[in-house]
Amino acid sequence: MKKDILAFAEQVKAPILLIILLWVIEAAKHIFDLRLQEFGIFPRAWDGFFGIFTGPFVHGSWGHLASNTLPLLALTSMMVTFYPKAASQALAMIMTGTGIMVWLFARPAYHIGASGVVYGLVAFLFWTGVFKKNAKSTVLALIVLTLYAGSVESMFPGVEKNISWESHLFGAMVGLVTAFILKGVVEEDEKNKNHPSWHGETTEKQYFLPRDAFEKTKIQRYYEYVYSSQNEESGNI
């Protein structure tokens, strides 16, 4: 039991460190009165392009950060626990892809916060279950759907004035594409270890009838039968 707890703690260390980093950045902003909003994504402006990589780490207020903390911690923990091989690549693709889409197509304003990444992770976990169709992925998809189905309305304009609905929408789109691209990544617990193909071996298929059963004439099969019967009687087989 203790060993399992330690193993789980090791798995979720990176998500916890990510959350700590976000809160340290927000604290530093208030303590030193920093104007970090300019590190957000400003669409179609070259000085706002760098925000693709920094925008998710900047938040508008403590409330904004608090609203993203629990979903981000829960979803990244699911990723590293159940999809450890794909987790880092998926997170990088979601963050970068969402940022690029926002920079290309969103309204001309600073877009900050990790909510686009959250929507990307939700979409990734859901669509991975759809594409993989194994028990683990399907259960995770259903859990995510149950928890976040009510968030769909925030992907469209008009819900709240200061919400970057574009980040939510593009995050969900990029999450879907990422799930499709990485659907072939096989985790250790998804491997059928009893199947020889996982060990580089091959097995010959078994058939009910001989493969040449319909290629031989009736007379040929008759003489083969007579020949084998004679050999059995003489003790050659």
Image (tube, helix red, strand yellow):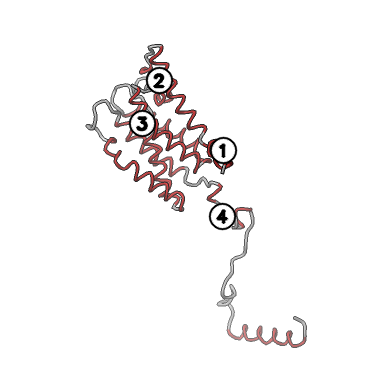
Q: Quadrant of residue 73?
A: top left
Q: Distance between the residues labelled 2 and 4?
A: 45 Å
| Front position in the image: 168 or 3 | 3
Residue type at mark 3: give it. Answer: Ser
Q: In which quarter of the image is the C terminus?
A: bottom right
- Can you give x and y, in whole percent of width and height, for residue 184 in the image? 50, 47
- Note whether 139 is above or below 235 in the view shown: above
Q: Distance between the residues labelled 3 and 1?
A: 30 Å
Task: Mark 2 and mark 3 in contact? Answer it, CB < 8 Å.
Answer: no
Residue type at mark 4: give it. Answer: Asn
Q: Which residue is found at the position 47% from the left and 40% from the top?
A: 79
* Res 26 label: 2
- Can you give x and y, in whole percent of width and height, for residue 216 in the image? 59, 79
- Can you give x and y, in whole percent of width and height, for residue 96 in the image? 43, 30
Residue under pointer 4: 192
Extreme residue in the top direction: 32
Q: Which of marks 2 and 4 is nearer the N terminus?
A: 2
Residue under pointer 1: 6
Q: Distance between the residues labelled 2 and 3?
A: 15 Å
- Label 3 neighbour load within 10 Å: few <14, some 14-19, many 20+: many
- Note whether 67 is above or below 205 in the view shown: above
Q: How far apart are marks 4 and 1 (CA)?
A: 26 Å
Helix, strand or loop status at disc 3: helix
Q: Earlier in the sequence, mark 4 or mark 1?
A: 1
